[in-house]
C-alpha cells in the first residue's frame, strides 16, 4: 500500500498549523477521506476522531449533518479494522448527541448500532437497539423502514433462540417487503421463517416458507440462495416424515454447495441431516461413515 501523499493532501497538512476550530476539523475530515480511499483505515480513524473532538466542542455552530458525517466516518473506519463493538458504542454515543436536534438521524444511528452489535455477536444489545429504533416516532416512516426494523428484530431474536417471538416480526417484515417490491428480501424472510419453524418442529409451516424461498431462488437462478432453500425444505420434509424427498433435497443442496463457493457450515449441517435419515432407514454403516468424515471438518471449523 502506497502512502505517498498527493498535492492536495500535502497542502491540507501544511494548512493544519495555521487553522483553528471548525476549519481545522473540516481539514481533518477531508484528510480522513483521502486516507480511507488509500486503505489507511487507522489514519482515517485518527483523523475523524480529531475532527469529532472539535465538532463536539463547537456543537452550537456545527450542523447535525457535519456531526453525522464524522460519526459515520469513525464507524466505517472501525468496521474496516474489525472493531465492530467499538463502532456500535460510538454509534450509541452519536444517538445521544443527535437525538435532540436530529431525531431521524439519531434513529438511523441506533439502527447502525444494532447492526454493529449483531456482527460483533452481541445479539442481546443488537435486539435492544433495533427494538428501540422500531419504537421511535418517525413522520417519514416508509414500508421499507417498517420492513427492515421488523426484519432486524426478528433475526436478532432468532440468534437468541427466541423463536416464537421472532415469527410475527419476520411475517410483518415479509408483508412490508412485499409492498415495497423487494423479492430477495422476501426470500430471506421465508428462509428464516422456515428455519424458525423447523426449530419449533412445525414441519407444515416450515415447508410452506421453504418452498416459497426455493421458488424464488430457482426463478432468480441464484445457486447460493437455492442451496440454502433446498436444505431448509429438506429439513422440513424430515419433520413431515417424508424421508425420501428430504434426502433428495439435501443431496441436491450438497451438490449445489460444491458447485459454487463452498459453505462449510452448510456442508456440515447437510451431511448430518443425511446421516440421520440413513440411520432411521437402517443404513447405519453408511451413516457412521458420513459422521466419521464430518469429524475432520468439525475439528477444522469448530464453531460451525
Image: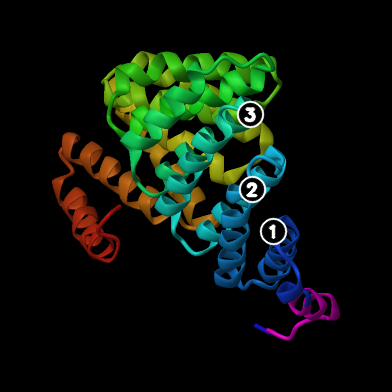
Query: With respect to residue 95, does 119 lie above or below?
Result: below
Q: Is the stretch drawn in magenta largely helix, strand or loop?
A: helix
Estimate the spatial distance between the alpha carbons at disc 2 and disc 3, rounded to whole Å. 14 Å
Of the numbered discs 2 and 3, the one sitting upstream in the chain is 2
- The secondary structure type at the circle numbered 2 is loop
Label 3 secondary element:
loop
- Residue numbers of the magenta segment: 3-14
Q: For the residues marked 1 and 3, what is the alpha-carbon distance in whole angstroms? A: 21 Å
Image vertical order of residue 85 relative to residue 29, above or below: above
Image coordinates of residue 228 in percent, x first then y, are 47, 39
Q: Name the residue under label 2.
A: 58
Give yes or no for contact between labels 2 and 3 (Cβ–Cβ under 8 Å): no
Q: Which of marks 1 and 3 is in front?
A: 1
Q: Marks 1 and 2: CB-CB under 8 Å?
A: yes
Q: Name the residue under label 1.
A: 21
- Name the colour scheme: rainbow
For the point 58% across and 48% down, the residue is 56
Q: Does the magenta stretch include residue 139?
A: no
The answer to which image quadrant residue 29 occupies is bottom right
Decide which of 179, 37 is in the foreground and name it.
Answer: 37
When asked about the image quadrant of residue 37, the answer is bottom right
Amino acid at each position: 500500500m502506497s502512502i505517498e501523499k498527493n498535492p492536495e493532501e500535502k497542502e491540507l497538512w501544511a494548512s493544519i498549523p495555521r487553522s483553528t476550530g471548525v476549519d481545522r476539523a473540516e481539514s481533518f475530515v477531508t484528510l480522513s477521506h483521502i486516507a480511507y480511499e488509500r486503505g489507511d483505515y487507522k489514519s482515517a480513524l485518527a483523523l475523524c476522531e480529531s475532527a469529532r473532538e472539535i465538532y463536539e466542542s463547537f456543537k452550537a455552530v456545527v450542523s447535525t449533518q457535519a456531526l453525522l458525517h464524522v460519526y459515520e466516518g469513525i464507524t466505517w473506519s472501525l468496521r474496516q479494522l474489525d472493531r465492530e463493538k467499538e463502532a456500535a458504542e460510538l454509534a450509541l454515543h452519536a444517538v445521544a448527541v443527535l437525538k435532540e436536534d436530529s431525531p431521524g438521524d439519531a434513529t438511523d444511528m441506533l439502527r447502525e448500532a444494532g447492526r454493529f452489535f449483531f456482527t460483533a455477536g452481541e445479539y442481546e444489545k443488537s435486539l435492544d437497539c433495533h427494538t428501540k429504533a422500531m419504537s421511535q416516532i418517525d413522520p417519514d416512516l416508509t414500508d421499507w423502514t417498517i420492513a427492515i426494523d421488523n426484519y432486524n428484530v426478528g433475526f436478532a431474536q432468532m440468534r437468541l433462540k427466541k423463536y416464537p417471538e421472532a415469527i410475527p416480526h419476520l411475517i410483518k417484515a415479509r408483508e412490508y417487503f412485499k409492498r415495497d417490491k423487494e423479492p430477495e428480501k422476501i426470500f430471506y424472510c421465508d428462509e428464516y421463517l422456515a428455519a424458525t419453524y423447523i426449530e419449533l418442529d412445525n414441519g407444515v409451516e416450515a415447508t410452506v416458507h421453504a418452498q416459497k424461498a426455493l421458488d424464488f431462488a430457482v426463478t432468480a437462478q441464484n445457486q447460493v440462495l437455492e442451496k440454502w432453500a433446498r436444505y431448509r425444505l429438506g429439513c422440513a420434509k424430515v419433520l413431515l416424515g417424508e424421508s425420501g424427498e428430504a434426502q433428495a433435497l439435501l443431496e441436491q443442496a450438497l451438490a449445489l454447495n460444491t458447485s459454487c463457493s463452498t459453505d462449510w457450515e452448510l456442508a456440515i449441517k447437510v451431511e448430518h441431516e443425511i446421516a440421520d435419515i440413513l440411520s432411521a432407514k437402517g443404513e447405519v454403516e453408511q451413516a457412521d461413515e458420513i459422521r466419521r468424515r464430518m469429524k475432520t471438518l468439525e475439528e477444522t471449523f469448530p464453531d460451525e
